[in-house]
Image: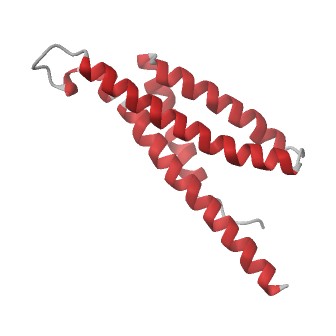
Amino acid sequence: MGAPIHIHFRVHHTTTATLAWAMWQYRTMSGAVFSIANVIMHIFLYAYFGGMRHKAMFWFVRIWGHVQLILGTAICTASILVKAHHLPKGSPVAADNSIVVGEGIPLALCLTYFVLFRMEITDSEAAIQKKSKKS
């Protein structure tokens, strides 16, 4: 049997439905950009897992994974700031669901995915080093 599924994949695949719902429900620009970046990521990821195991493909997937999550975090944050700035004076940010749900959920998930993605890479590098020391 293969290696256990990393927590990054378990969390990502259990929360993707929530992320997709928030992006569809509020149709935010950050959601559109993140969705396009995610589609690009998965095209190359599945090509890699499907057999295109070139070093360039490996590095593209690894780097694009970071770019996608940094881009999603930056755009969600900027969108929250812009929307909050344009609220009528005295209105609480919580009064605008497109800020709280449409941007807040994707921002929280992007940050979570980023931390878990880094953990996965760190864990895989540690496993490779441990394996090479045994050889």
Residue displayed at 72% across by 79% down: 130
**Residue in view at x 76 percent, y 65 percent:** 2
Picture quadrant of residue 65: top right
Q: Can you name the residue that lies furthest to the left here? A: 90
- On screen, residue 4 above or below 77: below
Q: Quadrant of the C terminus?
A: bottom right
Residue 94 on image: x %, y %: 21, 27
Q: How far from the left and from the top, in percent, is residue 85?
A: 25, 20
Which residue is at 21% across, 26% downward? 93
User: Could one spot residue 101 in this view of the protein?
Assistant: yes
Residue 72 position (above or below residue 118): above
Between residues 97 and 15, which one lies in front from this camera angle?
97
Q: Is residue 8 left or right of residue 40?
A: left
Q: 15 or 30: nearer the eye?
A: 30
User: Does any portion of residue 102 appear in the rendered image?
Assistant: no
The color scheme shown is: secondary structure
Q: Is residue 135 left or right of residue 105?
A: right
In the rendered view, does 93 fall on the left or right side of 126? Answer: left
Q: How many marks?
A: 0
Q: Residue at x 15, y 25 (%)?
A: 92
Report the front residue among 103 and 7. 103
- The N terminus lies in quadrant: bottom right
Give the percent coordinates (x, y) of residue 74: 46, 34
